[in-house]
Image (cartoon, rainbow, N blue to C red):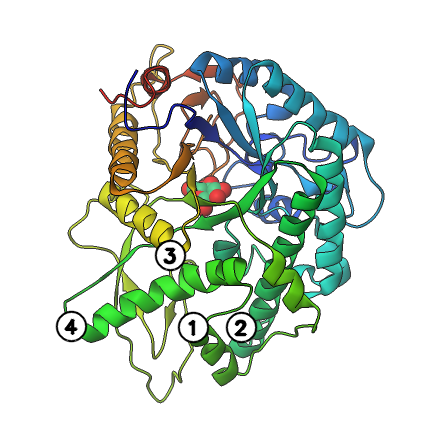
Amino acid sequence: MNTIFPKDFLWGASSSAFQIEGAWDEDGKKMTVADYNSFKKSDIQADTKVASDFYHHFEEDIDLMKELGMKTYRFSISWARIIPDGDGEVNQKGIDFYNKVINKLIECNIEPFVTLYHFDLPFTLVEKYNGWESRETVYAYERFAKICFKEFGDRVKYWQPHNEQNLIVRVEERINIYDEKDPLKIDKMRAQMDYNMCLAHAIAVNACHEMIRNSKIGAAVSSSVTYPLTCNPEDVCASRMNDNFKVYYMLDMHFYGEYPGYYLKYLKERDIMPYIEPEDKDILKRAKMDFIAVNYYRTNCAEALPVDDNHPYGTREGAVDFNLYGLFKMSMNPRLKASEYGASIDPSGLRVALNEYWQRYHLPLIITENGLGTPDVLEDGKVHDDYRIDYLREHINACALAIEDGVEMLGYCPWSFMDLLSSAQGFRKRYGLVYTNRTDHDILGLERIKKDSFYWYKKVIETNGKLE
Ligand code: BG6
């Protein structure tokens, strides 16, 4: 079928370990940061203990992926399953589990697309080193990455070192800053963790290329497209700075091996420059990504935010959508409709994002997350999720338009293959093409039920992107 999508386009779907696997302490696995944070909310919503129970259902789940016609499956490996303490003994049972998953995918002609670290740092590394603040965690990550490349690299060609480093560092809980209250100390810690994750990323890119022939590895970015709230030039500048501080400071470091000027200025003026060893420079410069993976959910607006007596330059306010005094203040776009969970729905913004990343870096792009989180209703064994079909259709169309614009795209993987544990709303907020029959407080039968969007997306894949 002739469409604008290349004939080997990787149609797929995504997930992550802590959000689907369950079996949180089975077969040697130990607690992760994701487990720890989810257990704090166990009485109000589902946690990671069972999640979608992929650990015990993976064969049936991969059979469904085959039925859907998926060309690739983007998933993550739980570091604490492979090395329960993060830097201690290797757990053969963890390696065996992922070997079974990967072998089953290959048997079903599905290309495994693996993220090494998706929000789930082994908790022992927090206790021992305060996680990413220490270079010990970088070395532990290097060992973990190399073990994965050695064990799975004969079958896994596509890799992502971290999922959304640029989002992880914005949320104190995700980087395990729990007790510190001084904002400057928090910013200093954050800057060091961020830098150490950049270094770990570069080490993984270099090792992957050295250890696996024909491998492809690239960053997964939580994308941000920011419109100026008004056409006041100050607001235009603020909107660019918002994208710079949310995305490009990190992508530039991954791509060029150094931070851009505006970010260095911020680190210096705030006096939070991270500790860097002289030999890091070569590691960072040598690391050449093969693609950029784009996770896209929404867009926002920004306006200028002047400093005041209580808020000197660089003072941060908020978490995921933080404001920076002297630079930008974020807001929702009054022209866009939002999902019931507050994400502005903006397919055109995806075309803008894809064009921007392509023009800046000229690296092929793949969408590894894009989807609509809603409270779906199961009725007579069916889920009529027309709203999700509309959402996916419009976003896939935006990819087609971007390809027409000249953007090189490798694939599209909606979030998520099946319903899974959403970070803030448990199982109330569902993203899947497949319904997981459970609620936040009742595990029920965990049956897998194909939603209407499953059948719709199956046709999209069969026709290589023909949109009905
Ligand atoms: C992405 C994450 O940022 O957003 C996923 O990579 C997450 O892990 C997804 O599930 C949707 O966010 P939420 O909060 O609705 O689960």
Residue 222 percent coordinates (x, y):
43, 50
Specify the quadrant that holds the C terminus.
top left
Residue 199 figure quarter: bottom right
Instruction: Give the residue pinned by disc 4.
Output: 232
Camera-side residue: 342 or 189? 189
Q: Which mark is residue 187?
A: 2
Q: Are marks 3 and 4 in contact (CB under 8 Å)?
A: no
User: Quick one: label 2, few (<14), some, or many (20+) residues within 10 Å?
Assistant: many
Of helix, strand and loop, which one carries label 2?
Answer: helix
Residue 412 figure quarter: top left
Q: Which mark is residue 5?
A: none
- The residue under the point 46% across, 71% down is 260
Instruction: Give the residue pinned by disc 3.
Output: 360
Camera-side residue: 180 or 222? 222
Closer to the eye: label 3 or 2: 3
Ligand 1 is within 8 Å of the C-beta of the residue at disc 4: no
Ligand 1 is within 8 Å of the C-beta of the residue at disc 1: no
Q: Amino acid at mark 3?
A: Arg
Q: Amino acid at mark 2?
A: Asp
| Left or right of residue 394: residue 271 | right
When the figure is inspected, residue 217 is found, relative to residue 285, above or below; the finding is: above
Q: Amino acid at mark 1?
A: Arg
Determine the CA span between mark 3 and mark 4.
25 Å
Determine the CA span between mark 3 and mark 2.
28 Å
Q: Are marks 3 and 2 in contact (CB under 8 Å)?
A: no
Please state the total of marks drawn on the protein image: 4
- The residue under the point 42% across, 77% down is 315
Q: Earlier in the sequence, mark 3 or mark 1?
A: 1
Q: Are marks 3 and 1 in contact (CB under 8 Å)?
A: no
Determine the CA span between mark 1 and mark 4.
23 Å
Q: Earlier in the sequence, mark 4 or mark 2?
A: 2
Q: Are marks 4 and 2 in contact (CB under 8 Å)?
A: no
